[in-house]
Image (cartoon, helix red, strand yellow):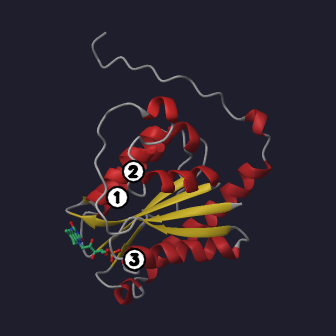
Amino acid sequence: MKVLLINGSPRKAGCTFTALSEVAGEIAAQGIETEIFHIGNDPIRGCQACWRCRETKRCFYDDDPVNACLKLAAAADGLVVGSPVYFAGINSALGTLLDRMFYSGSSLLAYKPACGVVSCRRGGAASAFDRLNKYFTFCNMPVVSSQYWNAVHGNKPAEVHQDAEGLQVMRVLGRNMAWLVKSLNSADQAARPEKEMPLRTNFIR
Ligand SMILES: Cc1cc2nc3c(=O)[nH]c(=O)nc-3n(C[C@H](O)[C@H](O)[C@H](O)COP(=O)(O)O)c2cc1C
């Protein structure tokens, strides 16, 4: 069993990484393998709405980390997505990666437990967290919760380390994720709900 954690920050070892490491530490303590995937600092193309992914279940554009990240997520048993808060939202490089990853790979990600984690200096955590949850709830992914909304506060890792409540929320989140991954792993796969083809009525009829 393995949980993939995506670090969407351009800062490889910044505050988001600090929060994700706390989640990963607890998941590992429960005997589950973890990997933190950093999306990197190179430009990530926006979704071109070409729909070619509908057939291939991967993005047509293969020159950035989207397909590599989707492959890792599809092979994992659970997913954690971490973002710094930028103007009360998720950072744009992560947003464009997630748009393409979740649009092309929704059927590969379905039924994997998932959660978002955000890091902010002061405000906007709730709206960024809400946006992350939209990806999971679009894809039939059970959303894992903690005992508060999944945010840490700080501009530098040392400040995040002082956010005792935020770090506790991360550890509880990791424990809850591990519990759900293990529970689903031992559950009867045949009992899984059947996925329905989404209707697309575009509000015109
Ligand atoms: C472009 C930009 C916009 C930001 N917007 C916000 C914001 O709206 N609210 C906030 O509290 N912090 C904001 N910050 C600060 C970061 O969210 C905060 O420092 C975060 O913990 C950085 O995480 P990282 O070290 O993983 O990149 C912003 C930072 C940048 C670079």
Residue that appears at 29% across and 39% down: 48
Instruction: Please identify the quarter of the rendering in which residue 50 is found.
Output: top left
Question: As rendered, which of 171 and 78 lies closer to the eye?
Answer: 78
Q: Which amino acid type corresponds to the residue marked 2 in the rendered image?
A: Leu
In the rendered view of the protein, which quadrant contains the N terminus? bottom right
Question: As rendered, which of 146 and 63 lies closer to the eye?
Answer: 63
Q: Which structural element holds mark 1?
A: helix
Residue wearing tag 3 = 12
Q: Are marks 1 and 2 in contact (CB under 8 Å)?
A: yes
Q: Residue furthest front?
A: 63
Q: Are marks 1 and 3 in contact (CB under 8 Å)?
A: no
Residue wearing tag 1 = 94
Q: Is residue 136 visible?
A: yes
Q: Which structural element holds mark 3?
A: loop
Residue that appears at 29% across and 55% down: 127
Is residue 28 shown left or right of residue 190?
left
Residue 30: percent from left, percent from top: 71, 71
Residue wearing tag 2 = 98
* Disc 3: residue Cβ within 8 A of ligand 1's nearest atom: no
